[in-house]
Image (cartoon, rainbow, N blue to C red):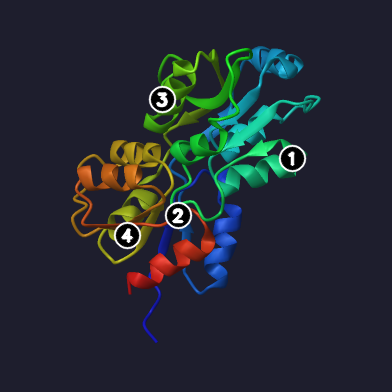
């Protein structure tokens, strides 16, 4: 039987447990090397205000599992009629775990070609209206002034909403930062860029941080598995030798990992 490739899991620490367990259960040697450090925002007053005003919003968009976890870290609102939007199954499950009724959630169907904002928009675009704002809960970069920039997908969704006359409010509920890697981890990563390991990326931010940590690394022998074409394109732009795409579900990731053998 061919040896299963080792896997480098780059998701934030709070989002990687289920992936780690699932991959190990199928015989993969997995290294969890988070490439995004996530921590709460120092000032939680804006979040508390948003939770208190929950019913003002026709929908609240959660950009990630981390957005759910940090939004409800100190309490939950009265759900009312406000819709909760998620682009992927991980974020949807986090909402369920937080107590959001399934009847209030909108997300792409399991059979969607991709789990992204475009797929979510196909689900919700007929029901949005200009009478109430939409709140987008996101992360901010710790080393930069807070801004609305959150990525191509979120920018696109905001444009669609604004074209329908919907006011979009954004709120950072967690901070992202570059992790601190010691000399041993950097050496391990150098080896993993050449030994056939498959790096699993679910965010372009992870690639940005990896480039900051290893600016002189040659990635031509490296193998990556990206959960969206935009992430794959970012890896290829950085010179990665082999990059494949899989939806962010365990069966799809496992099937793609088998194809690397």
Residue where numbered disc 2 is placed: 247
Does the image show residue 74?
yes
Q: Position of residue 32 (x, y in %)?
A: 49, 54
Residue where numbered disc 3 is placed: 155
Residue where numbered disc 1 is placed: 103
Q: Quadrant of the N terminus?
A: bottom left
On the rendered structure, is 95 left or right of 171? right
Q: Nearer the viewer, mark 3 or mark 4?
A: 3
Question: Above or below — where is 155 with respect to 35?
Answer: above
Residue where numbered disc 4 is placed: 192
Residue at image coords 67%, 18% = 57
Counting residues from the N terminus, which is met first, the one under dot 2 or under dot 4? 4
Distance from Cα at disc 3 to Cα at disc 1: 26 Å
Distance from Cα at disc 3 to Cα at disc 4: 34 Å
Counting residues from the N terminus, which is met first, the one under dot 3 or under dot 2? 3
Numbered mark located on residue 147 in the image: none
Q: Nearer the viewer, mark 3 or mark 1?
A: 1
Q: Residue furthest front?
A: 126
């Amino acid at each position: 039987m061919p040896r299963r490739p080792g896997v480098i899991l780059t998701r934030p620490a709070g989002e990687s447990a289920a992936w780690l367990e699932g991959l190990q259960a199928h015989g993969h040697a997995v290294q969890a090397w988070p490439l995004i450090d996530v921590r709460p925002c120092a000032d939680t007053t804006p979040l508390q205000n948003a939770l208190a005003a929950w019913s003002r919003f026709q929908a609240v968009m959660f950009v990630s599992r981390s957005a759910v976890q940090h939004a409800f870290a100190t309490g939950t609102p009265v759900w009312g009629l406000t819709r909760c939007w998620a682009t992927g199954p991980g974020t949807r499950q986090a909402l369920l775990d937080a107590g959001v009724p399934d009847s209030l959630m909108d997300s792409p169907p399991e059979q969607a070609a991709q789990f992204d904002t475009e797929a979510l928009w196909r689900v919700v675009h007929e029901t949005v209206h200009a009478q109430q704002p939409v709140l987008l809960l996101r992360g901010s970069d710790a080393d930069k002034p807070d801004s609305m920039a959150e990525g191509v997908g979120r920018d696109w969704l905001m444009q669609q909403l604004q074209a329908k006359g919907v006011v979009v409010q954004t709120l950072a509920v967690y901070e992202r930062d570059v992790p601190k890697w010691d000399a041993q981890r950097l050496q391990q990563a150098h080896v993993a860029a050449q030994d056939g390991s498959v790096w699993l990326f679910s965010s372009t931010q992870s690639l940005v941080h990896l480039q900051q940590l290893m600016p002189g690394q040659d990635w031509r022998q490296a193998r990556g598995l990206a959960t969206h074409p935009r992430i794959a394109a970012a890896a290829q732009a950085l010179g990665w030798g082999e990059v494949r795409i899989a939806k962010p579900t365990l069966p799809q990731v496992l099937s793609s990992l088998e194809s690397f053998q």
